[in-house]
Every structure is written in C-alpha cells, then in structure tokens.
Amino acid sequence: MARANRRRIRRLALVSSVAAIAALTPVLGQSATADPPPGQPTVAQIQRQLGELAFANTQLVEQYDVAQGDVAVKTQAAQQAEQLAAQADSAFQIARDQLGAAAAAIYEGGSFSATGALLTSSSGQSYLDRLQTLSMISSHTAQVVDNLNIANTQAQKARKQADGLLASAQRTRDALAAKKAEVEKQLGDYQALLDRLGAQQRAAYLQQVNPAVSAATVAQLRAQAPSASSGAAATAVQFALAQVGKPYVFGAAGPNSYDCSGLTMAAWAAAGVSLPHSAAGQYGYGTHVSFAQLQPGDLMFFYQPIGHVTIYIGNGMMVSAPTSGQNVSVVPANQFGSAYVGATRLTG
C-alpha cells in the first residue's frame, strides 16, 4: 500500500510539473520591466511562475534519480533470474537425457535391464526382486526429472517476470527523462529571462527568493562551526560553508558547482559518510529529529514528495544550493516555511 501511495504521489508531482511548464510558456517570450505594458506579467508574476518551474524540475530530477536506481536494481535482479533459469534448464535437460538413457538400457537389454535380470538371476524370487529394484530406480529417476521440470518452469516464469519488471522500470525512467529534458529546456529560457532583467530587478529578485547572509557572517559561522557540533558534523558543516558562492547546477556534486543533494552528499562524504545523490534517498539515512532538536550537520528536507535538502549549520541558519540562476548560500532555516518535512541526524 505504501509503495502504491508513493507511486500515486509521484504521478501527482508529474502532473504539477507539466502544469508549471504550461503556465510558464506564454511568459518566457515577454520582457520583465518595472512597469510592464497592459496585458504583460509583472515581475512578481514572473518570479512566482519561475519558482514553480524550478521546483517542478527539482521534483523531476529527484524522481529520475529514484527511477534510475530502480532500473539498476531490477537489471541486477533480471540478470540473476536469467542465470538461475539457465541453470535450471540445463539441470532439467541433463536429467531428462539420463532418464532416457536409463529407460533404453532397461528395455534394450544389458545387465541393467529386465532381460539382464532374467539371465543373471539365480532364482525366480531373485528375478522378481531385481525387477522391483529396477522399477524403483526408474520411478525415482522419473520423479527427479519431474521435480527438475517443475523447478525449470518456475525459473523461466521468474525470469520472464523479472524481465517484465525491468522493462516497466525502464519505461518509467525514460518517461521521466523526457519530462526532465522538457523542463530543462524551459529552464534555459528561464535563465535567458533572468539575464534580460535589469541589474536592479535581478538583484531584487535574488534577494527576495534567496536572502543570503553577508560574507562576514559566513566567516563567523565557519569559525563557530567546530565547537557547535561533533567532529563528523563539524567537518560536513565546514565543507558546506566553504562552497558558499558556487553556482547551482542540476546533477552537480562539486567541486565547482552543486545541486541540493549533491552539496549535502559531498559535505558528508568529506566526513566519511556515504549518501545517495537524491534528496528523497537521503531522507532514509540517519535518525529523524524534530525542528526544535536541530544541531549543526543535520540534514533538512522540504516539499512533499521530498524535493529539496539543505544542511543545518546552527543559529537558525542552513546552507542551501537553491535552484538555477542562484548560488550556494547561507539562509534562514525557516525560509521555506510550511514546505519543511523533517530532518535527519547522521553520525560519522
């Protein structure tokens, strides 16, 4: 049931992604000015639509990463099923050939046959005993072959089922890849639109959606981090703070650019902890803690289904790799408001 619910949630996310794309399309061809002509969108409207598109893309990237992982798992399962099916078929074929050879020996003569038993038996009772033994051997061999045939049939069925599950996973991944490519094309238009904004408008936009703290504050936070958390967490926090100012790039995990889960993955890798390159995947690692229990190094997760992850650094702040057109920055931990889902604590 839980798995079915997750699939339903992912389908809903795809629907919202397409809706975001559709909403953005008529806007991208228009310029953003402080006082737009009648009928043209305001800067605030453009900001809202671009934010929806960026979130849609984040969702698709996360879902694609999960789907790609599912394909890898099912590929391995299909390969194992193929190997087991080949072994089962070989065992059945060998046993069937042996049964045929034994049957031929029984009916065509030789010491291992009814005729051979008759010619070599010392008495009628001895002959009957040997016939009974031959019958038991033949029956046992036939039963072994029947069992191997059943096992072979089941193995072939399992192989076909594994192949079917793999094909289904590949179709899901390919569909997400197509949607992701569509959104990424729109994001190219989004970046072009941001570039067309005046310097003042662009600065106001970035400050509104990503009110980063000053460089002096970042330096102060870096100085405080080691005493504020455990050794491994301090290492992760220091690494994350050292990336502040680097650009956000989808799918990047350093050293020159990052996406959200790429940043947290790299930060904790520096502390010796391995994490998947997926916000949703990282949510399954560590111990879940409440917002009130947050400590430096904890991972914070946002949106449902999970589409964003940051690293808490203390003093009500976090390091976030936000979205296209923005840089890794230090922002308030409550920046995303009700989009907050939960947090996890890792140990080195």
Image (tube, rainbow, N blue to C red):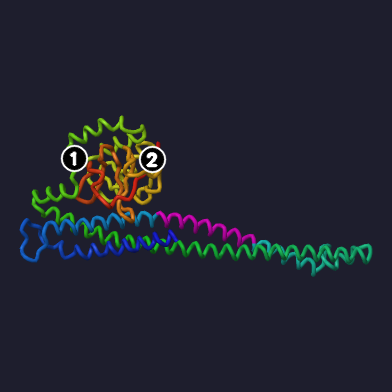
Amino acid residing under circle 2: Leu
Residue 310 visible to an observer of this rendering:
yes
- Locate residue 20 relative to residue 74 in the image: left or right: left
Residue 37 position within the rendered picture, expressed as x and y whole percent measured from the top left? 5, 63
Q: Which mark is residue 279?
A: none
Q: Residue at x 30, y 37 (%)?
A: 237
Q: Which residue is drawn at 13% across and 53% down?
A: 195
Location of mark 1 (residue): 213
Location of mark 2 (residue): 346
Amino acid residing under circle 1: Val
Residue 131 belongs to the span the image colors magenta: no
Give the magenta part as a residue range: 69-91
Residue 185 position within the rendered picture, expressed as x and y whole percent measured from the top left? 23, 59
Residue 200 position within the rendered picture, expressed as x and y whole percent measured from the top left? 8, 49
Quadrant of the rendering where the N terminus is positioned: bottom left
Main secondary structure along the magenta-highlighted residues? helix
Disc 2, SS: loop
Disc 1, SS: loop
Q: Which of marks 1 and 2 is nearer the N terminus?
A: 1
- Locate residue 306 relative to residue 163 in the image: left or right: left
- Locate residue 128 relative to residue 76 in the image: left or right: right
